[in-house]
Image (spheres, grey):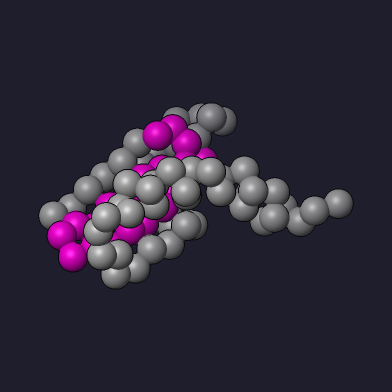
Amino acid sequence: MKKFSERIGKRFEHRINEVMEKFKDETVLGAFGSANFFGQESLGLGQVRGNGVLVLTEKELYFEMWSPKKYYTFR
């Protein structure tokens, strides 16, 4: 049986790739595929509370939740 972290990794791998595709033409200074954001209350079972992708470019700090598809950007 696969470890819990391996199952989660495969499940959200496509979300990480979707987000990184948005930055293909920019200089990415840093990126984390499993970042935590604590500024969001849980919306129930369909949401993985506060988890998502964090990307830092020369122009912005971008965070997109794994589920639901919600993003925050700071410029």
Residue 64 located within the stretch drawn in magenta: yes
Q: Residue 11 in the image: state x and y as whole percent.
A: 62, 43
Q: Quadrant of residue 29?
A: bottom left
Left/right placement of residue 27 relative to residue 75 reads: right
Residue 50 located within the stretch drawn in magenta: yes
**Farthest residue in the bottom direction?**
29
Highlighted range, magenta? 48-69
Q: Residue 20 in the image: state x and y as whole percent.
A: 39, 52
Q: Which residue is found at the position 31% from the left and 41% from the top?
A: 71
**Farthest residue in the right direction?**
1
Q: Is residue 30 above or below residue 23?
A: below
Q: Quadrant of residue 3?
A: bottom right
Q: Which residue is found at the position 64% from the left and 48% from the top?
A: 10
Q: Residue 66 in the image: state x and y as whole percent.
A: 47, 42
Q: Which residue is found at the position 47% from the left and 36% from the top?
A: 67
Quadrant of the drawing holding the C terminus: bottom left
Q: Is residue 34 visible?
A: yes
Q: Which residue is found at the position 38% from the left and 48% from the top?
A: 21
**Farthest residue in the front direction?**
25
Q: Is residue 6 above or below residue 18?
A: below
- Nearest the viewer among 46 and 59 is 59
Q: Residue 74 in the image: state x and y as whole percent.
A: 18, 53
- Nearest the viewer among 44 and 51 is 51
Q: Is residue 50 visible?
A: no
Left/right placement of residue 47 relative to residue 1 reads: left
Q: How many marks?
A: 0
